[in-house]
Image (spheres, coloured by chain):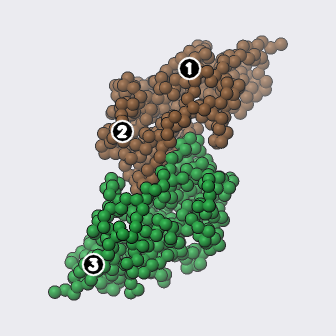
Chain colours: A green, B brown
Amino acid sequence: MAEQLRNRFVALKSHVNGEPTESDFDIKTESIAVAARSGEVIVKTLCVSVDPYQLNRMKANCSSQAAIGFAAAIPPGQAIDTYGVGRVVASGRAEFSKDELVIGLLSWGEYTVVEQGRLLNKLDPMGLPLHYHVGPLGFSGLAAYGGFFEVCNPKKGESVFVSTASGSVGSLVGQYAKLFGCRVVGSAGSQSKVDLLKQKLGFDDAFNYKDETDLKSALKRHFPDGIDIYFDNVGGEMLEAAIANMNTYGRVAVCGAISEYTGGGRKAALELLDVVYKRITVQGFLAADHLKCYPDFISSTAEYINAGKMEVLCSISHGVDSIPGAFVGLFRGDNIGKMVVKISDK
Amino acid sequence: MAEQLRNRFVALKSHVNGEPTESDFDIKTESIAVAARSGEVIVKTLCVSVDPYQLNRMKANCSSQAAIGFAAAIPPGQAIDTYGVGRVVASGRAEFSKDELVIGLLSWGEYTVVEQGRLLNKLDPMGLPLHYHVGPLGFSGLAAYGGFFEVCNPKKGESVFVSTASGSVGSLVGQYAKLFGCRVVGSAGSQSKVDLLKQKLGFDDAFNYKDETDLKSALKRHFPDGIDIYFDNVGGEMLEAAIANMNTYGRVAVCGAISEYTGGGRKAALELLDVVYKRITVQGFLAADHLKCYPDFISSTAEYINAGKMEVLCSISHGVDSIPGAFVGLFRGDNIGKMVVKISDK
């Protein structure tokens, strides 16, 4: 009989509707035989990504949304997939060997049996910390890069507004925009985050949205000549305020809408007269739409990081048991930059 | 002393906020000397366009919007500019001669003194009725053509939804889409309009939105396989319902938002999760943005009309005194197709 591994993993107790709490999750244990069948690869998790969008997959009505890849429903009781880095324990595929580093769709858990067809690639860490590969060099990075360069279609000298600017995607968008030659202002939810944006990430300016009673006025103050590009991670009132302050031919890339995920915030009610007269484009996108720019994204981002031109912000927690808390904290703004959970060092 | 013309024209009494009424307007009389100064052209109006967007220019807060061309504020007491066809009475410009037909920015009135720099071109009627040139061959047509082909980026076989489909722009969009090879469904506000769309304009289907209690369900019924393109003329709940029924990579061209102009309807609250996961693009535009496709637009539209492939829907009223009523009626859905006022026959 094959050697058995004990696998501890996070599962949903039941669908989450509204703000998530740690009690929505269970830590479950299962036994995995270390004998990969043909096509399967058994992977030990080293680190995994924790992302706000996963909440949408935990809702009871998730099936009403397009069931595409990362948007597929997460059924209660089962392992929760996410982007992660791991090491091959046993391989039933010729292209993967034991002990190799891999990156792909793993689980919020210690081990994953990766079936044929599920995203899995060899990982060249390029001398960078492994957790960078689920953050700035992973889908957060690709969302920032593809969203900014492909969806926002920036021109040098344009004015860019980024919400949740100290988050995993926003912190990168702002830095790409600065490196490209734009003027960049970010919003965040605390004074320390605002300081970080201005002092460490090189934003031209930043503000704490919780200190503002009128977001339209706040944006008017920070963009007296209007906003050309809004990289939206929050939706709701901030999107309305940005539309009101946009210039003619302004572009809004909708990457996420965290204020609307929990059902607590109200939906953005767009001023369509502005949309028409200012010829504004509002475009939703997913990182996976921009795989064609993946090679450019990886090479330029790794170069920026290695050259010290780009700061990587990560919040790291440790162990499977810390995953629910790390996830729940995303909706309270606990994290700075990319939230990553390290499961094992090797 | 130069001959004097008596000019009767429509003016705003005061700013309009909300639904317009005929009492918001005055008919004023002025005297114009038939002696064009250098750079001026005095034009006798033959017919003029009456459009919903003009209401936005009559609002007290209009100055807060981009003051570009057709969006400029209309001050109370002054003549109201609009697209129209006329005949030159006297010319202070070498390129225009007395009695020539012209088209450009005239007034809701009998005569206009067109200053240098204001839109004015010679008109070749191409054997078609003059009022066609302020409708299907004017800015309504260009909005339909540019909006559909440039903004919506259609592919043959796609499913297209058009609101206010029996209106000046919608009736043309639906016909362009059918001629291009799309499946087209339209919404309108009466059974007779619905019949017209299906029987005269060749729409695949149509429905009376006033008969529907749930617009989302109505669109689901008419688009069981989803909407690829929504040409939006109304905003509000219809836009929300369209977003809910859109396919991945769906496109929304926002041409107008008549339900929101009067302040009576509520603003569209977009479901951003749909926008993101379905990668929907919502884009506002103005006809004037698409002047580069003007030659294609004019030649293909004139050809379609002459060949009997395209129906022209017009509602015509007569005389300056009928203008306020024609305008007010737009917001009650009185018109079918393009609303034009004939001022003089020659």
Sequence order check: which comes first, mark 2 or mark 1? 2
Apparent side of residue A337 relative to residue A17 in the rendered image (left or right): right
Give how far across and how far down residue B341 sits, in percent. Answer: 56, 19
Residue at the disc numbered 2: B214
Q: Which residue is mark 1?
A: B325
Quarter of the image with the C terminus of chain B is top right
Q: Is residue B122 left or right of residue A39?
A: right
Q: Along the horizontal axis of the image, is B7 left or right of A130? A: right
Farthest residue toward the left? Answer: A1
Q: Is residue B102 above or below residue B296?
A: above
Give the structural element (helix, strand or loop) at label 2. loop
Q: Which of the 4 image quarters holds residue A11?
A: bottom left
- What is the count of numbered marks? 3
Residue B59, placed above or below residue A31: above
Distance from disc 2 to disc 1, alpha carbons, whole Å, reads 32 Å
- State the quadrant of the N terminus of chain B: top right
Residue under the point 23% across and 80% down: A31
- CA–CA distance in space, label 3 to label 2: 46 Å
Q: Chain of mark 1?
A: B
Q: Position of residue A127 (x, y in %)?
A: 48, 83
* Residue type, numbered disc 2: Asp
User: The residue under label 1 is which amino acid type?
Assistant: Gly
Disc 3 and disc 2 in contact, CB within 8 angstroms? no
Question: Residue B135: which disc?
Answer: none
Q: Amino acid at mark 3?
A: Thr
Residue B51: percent from left, percent from top: 55, 29
Q: Which mark is residue A29?
A: 3
